[in-house]
Image (cartoon, rainbow, N blue to C red):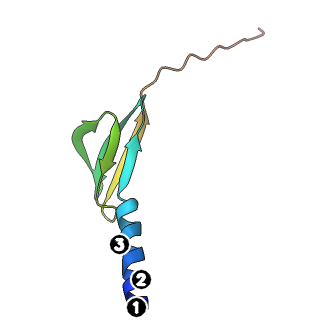
Amino acid sequence: MPMRTFLLVFLSAALLSACTVIRPGEVGVKRKLGVMNEKIHRGGPVTYFPFTTRVLKVPTRTINVELNLDL
């Protein structure tokens, strides 16, 4: 019984860590073993294999910075 419980916990943790959410104002790009994929994920949930793949989230919003310089 303890082995079954351990296996169930391990599999559920692996499945939950294999999903990420791309929020509005971001895009996601998958990187598998250091190689970037050309497909861009615009928004919503993205699944991936967590041992070899990462999803890089890049913000696409424009941020206005106001500078006040005393010269």
Mark on residue 45? none
Question: Dot 1 surroundings within 10 Å: few (below 14), some, or many (20 or more)?
Answer: few
State the quadrant of the N terminus.
Answer: bottom left
Q: Mark 1 or mark 3, which is nearer the start of the sequence?
A: 1
- Three-letter amino acid code of the residue under disc 2: Thr
Q: Secondary structure at mark 2?
A: helix
Which residue ends up furthest to the front in the rendered image?
Answer: 1
Mark 2 touches mark 1? (CB < 8 Å) = yes
- Mark 3 → mark 1, Cα distance in angstroms: 16 Å
Residue at label 2? Answer: 5
User: Marks 3 and 1: which is nearer the front?
Assistant: 1
Q: Quadrant of residue 52?
A: bottom left
Left or right of 36? Residue 62 is: right
* Position above or below: 24 against 62: below
Residue for badge 1: 1
Residue that badge 3 annotates: 11
Amino acid type at mark 1: Met
Residue located at (41% from left, 68% from top):
13
Q: Characterize the local packing of mark 2: few (<14), some (14-19) or many (20 or more) Cα atoms within 10 angstroms.
A: few
Q: Residue at x 64, y 13 (%)?
A: 66
